Image (cartoon, rainbow, N blue to C red):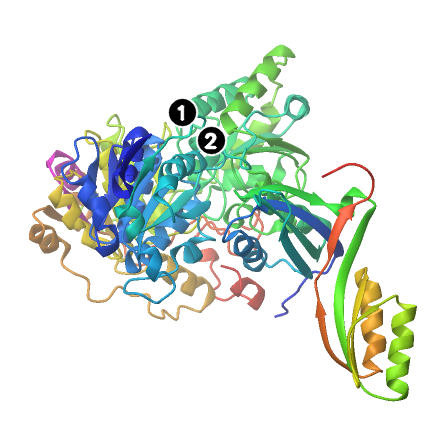
Amino acid sequence: MKITTETGERHVLAVTVDNEAGVLAKITGLFTARGYNIESLTVADITADHALSRITIVTSGPPPIIDQIIAQLDRLVPVHKVTDLTDQGAHVEREIALVKVAGTGDKRIEALRLADVFRAKVVDTTINSFIFEITGNSEKVDRFIALMRECGLVEVGRTGVVAIARGAEAL
Amino acid sequence: MTEMSGADMVVQALVDLGVDTVFGYPGGAVLPIYDALFNHPQIKHILVRHEQAATHAAEGYARVTGRPGVVLVTSGPGATNAVTGITDALLDSIPMIVLTGQVPTTLIGTDAFQECDTVGITRHCTKHNYLVMDPDRLGPILHEAFYIATHGRPGPVVIDIPKNVQVAVGTYSVPARIEHQSYRPQVEPDAAAIAEAIELIAAAERPIFYTGGGVINAGPDASAALRQLVGLTGAPITSTLMGLGAFPSDDPKWLGMLGMHGTYESNMAMNRADLIIAVGARFDDRVTGRLDAFAPHAKKIHIDIDRSSINKIVPVDVAVLGDAGRALDALIAAWQDKGHKARDLGEWWRRIDGWRAARCLDFPEKKDAAAEIMPQRAVKALFEATRGRDPIITTEVGQHQMWAAQHFGFSAPNRWLTSGGLGTMGYGFPAAVGAQIARPDRLVICIAGEASLQMNIQEMGTVSQYRLPVKIFILNNEWMGMVRQWQELTYESRYSNSYSDSLPDFVKLAEAYGWTGMRIDTLGELEEGIQTMLDTPGPVIVDCRVAKLANCFPMIPSGAAHTDMILQPSDVTGTMDDEAKALV
């Protein structure tokens, strides 16, 4: 017999939660237990009193599954609010990558030139390496890393996506 | 605000929350709380023989009273043994508080003796859980835990308390207003949704109510409202396994249970309906059968307190988020405000009567006194013998559970206690213990299979200790009957490990525990045997020998539609394709 899996559209969810031990495990565990995808997940506390954290989750699935993910998240006791930024409309997404490239000669010059095109910053250098810091949406970061593969890429660290809705309103 | 030890705070909070009974088992990491409970004037502690039984007993207590059941167990194995019952309570939405001891905070994470990551292990089988690191938090957390366990969709909450937090002295405080910061379930239904729903109900030609455990959980008033609304509309009603008792089984509008072992008329009516009014039910796979053939012609109204239940399995046309009782009250008010009158559903009822004529719950049997007892007959005889005594019935899991659901009639809520969602063998007997503790003067009967009963049979000691008059009625067919039935249906009767070998002599076992033991072998002995059980004071175990190879029909085979019911044993082919085999 065939085991089928469904694919669907990408959604960015912003989830405000109590900043307490175990909350992140509860949320990631929900995704694992119910078979939902996590493409990226970021979390940090966002209030002056450190009471709340904001989790940004990039997930994918057909519309009923996205609806179910939101409902499942929303009923967790420590979850304050779940917002589907993709559904809500215009929003800004950013992630940061640190990209280490090693090499000399033409490859090193080409890496620096491409970094300039992508407005990546050099944050560390040795005689035969650079670390670039690049900020942008995931697609831009993907493209930069793909190009660096040709120029001596040795290591990548990425933050995952943070996102926020455009305009003056808060969530 | 009073200074006291953490253990005293736990007990004080239980008293303040109106708890009168705790089911538990002591151990190293909860000794301070046990000491605080010693000879306590208000809280009765029931000592079980295994922590899993404490959780099921607490579930039984909760289902009968509507109040949360409270469990107290030690760290490590105490907590892990409780996990099955906690999960059972999560799946059946039963309010429960589980207090677990934990190693001292200084030893957490060191693989200390009897340490386990209780909050980690129970994170996904609780509605919420806590690890209390500061005694001053105990008061607020216990009160919040009760709020969470009982508000919205009920469920189990675990509070893990390290031993040094129990010993330390702190300040006991009770929150002025018990309201959670982020957890605020919607109780009152939306008026627009109610208005939309009532128009659909008034206009439907072939409506059917499909109700579940949510109506029971919403309290006796919700059951009364359901009866009123069904009466106003004149529509037929079916219910899930969890919903039995919310509507009287002797009412002509009652079609019986639906789903895999539901009645033919219920399943056919669901399939042909033009409107399904789902109240506190969650479109479980045991109910829907094959999804793409489920109620193809029906619009669906779904009343549920849990937003995630809506559109999870079956997309619905009108969603009413809120408490089942409040929603039913609102529907009744809207029906009356609009001046709706029941439509003439005569044509619909004529079709239903046609399906009823199949008499799907009939079963072949020999009638002479020496004949073997059909298990269905045993349940029917038990039902007849206890009419007017308003018994509380618990079950284990398997064929006997389905026969009890099919053939025992319930006319009020909180009298039918069975493990629906998790399907936990070993549930019924400890649940009967909890029910009997909650209702000492009522007749409590556990209808059991000989296999399931053995999963928590150690609780016979608990029953003896507290002199509980629990009756266990075993439908003994010497098989894990439902497993054997599926092997017959799917694996050409290769009965792999489903025979109940080396059974104990249940009569002698009863005597060993100071109970009364009885055996019923033939049809001629059945009625008198049941009467003797009922007339015997104290706990009784009845080993009722039934037909060994009887199967539970009607049945929707896994992966089949409501219209493809197996009504008779002769319909069984003995094989299935891989798609069907893969379904549970």
Q: Is residue B539 magenta?
A: yes
Q: Do labels 2 and 1 share a chain?
A: yes
Quick check: B19 left or right of B422?
left
- How many numbered dots are placed on residues in this image? 2
Few, some or many C-alpha atoms within 10 Å of disc 2 (few <14, some 14-19, many ≥20)? many
| Circle nearer the N terminus (2, 1) | 2
Residue drawn at x 79%, y 62% is A138
Closer-to-camera residue (B234/B68): B68
Residue B576: percent from the left, percent from the top? 53, 65
Q: Quadrant of residue B503?
A: bottom left
Residue drawn at x 66%, y 36% is B298
Q: In which quarter of the image is residue A169?
A: top right
Q: Is mark 2 on a helix, strand or loop?
A: helix
- Rounded to the nearest angstrom, the CA distance separating label 2 from label 1 is 8 Å
Residue carrying label 2:
B215
Quadrant location of the N terminus of chain B in the rendered image: top left
Q: Give, as a three-letter code, the residue at label 1.
A: Pro
Residue drawn at x 19%, y 31% is B440
Quick check: B445 left or right of B132?
left
The reply to whether discs 2 and 1 touch (Cβ–Cβ < 8 Å) is no
Q: Give, as a three-letter code, the residue at label 2.
A: Val
Q: Is mark 1 on a helix, strand or loop?
A: helix
Q: Does the magenta stretch include residue B110?
A: no
Quick check: B107 left or right of B436?
right
| Boundaries of the magenta span | B529-544
Quick check: B480 left or right of B268?
left
Q: Residue B220 carries which label?
A: 1
